[in-house]
Amino acid sequence: KNPVTAESVRLKVKRALGDKSVALVQIVVQSMENMYLYLTHESKDAVAKRKHKYSQADIKLLNNFDIDRYITLDAEDKDEMLNDVCELIDDYGLANMRELRRFVTAHGLEHNLPSMKVVNSVLRAHTGLVRLYFDAVYQERKYGRPSVDKETGEIK
């Protein structure tokens, strides 16, 4: 209904970040996620060229922009993120979703987890597996960690 021009975006950015913040605004032809990865030097090309990676925490998002709306993960990325989350649950002894959410909020970027919103979208299809990991942590908290005989594999 109300198209936004490149010029109006440029002026809005200048007002928010200062006169020297931007000289040119272009319409995004690629995907928004690819453009974001390009600008932060996280694209495959930038990584291959060993460009300096900008911290996502230092990026100022305007007008409630939410990059997570544009992030699309392929099946391999989702499997990798699921494995990473399960390892974090085990390594850090996270016993439930609240603890996981707090951990991702505080340390997600350190572990290549973009946000809890994206993590939730991946975990949604694997709630049974995640519940087993949480339950294991809970059981260890309640009853102690069992020891395993390295020669026989017997649990003591």
Image (cartoon, rainbow, N blue to C red):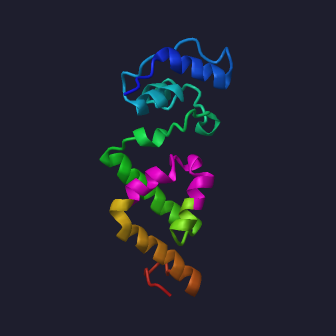
Q: Could you tell whether 41 is left or right of 19 in the image?
A: left
Q: Residue at x 41, y 74 (%)?
A: 132
Foreground pick, 40 / 13: 13
Using the image, determine if residue 32 lies above or below residue 25. below
Q: Could you tell whether 144 is left or right of 151 in the image?
A: right
Magenta stretch: give its range: 102-123
> Predominant secondary structure in magenta?
helix
**Is residue 83 found inside the magenta-colored segment of the image?**
no
Q: Residue at x 54, y 38 (%)?
A: 64
* Residue 65 shows in this picture: yes
Tell me residue 13's x, y (percent). 59, 22
Where residue 62 sits, quadrant-wise, is: top right
Foreground pick, 73 / 13: 13
Tell me residue 140's x, y (percent). 54, 80
Tell me residue 95's x, y (percent). 54, 72
Q: Could you tell whether 78 is left or right of 37 in the image?
A: left
Spot the residue most to the front.
1
* Residue 147 shows in this picture: no
Using the image, determine if residue 150 lies above or below residue 50. below
**Is residue 109 found inside the magenta-colored segment of the image?**
yes
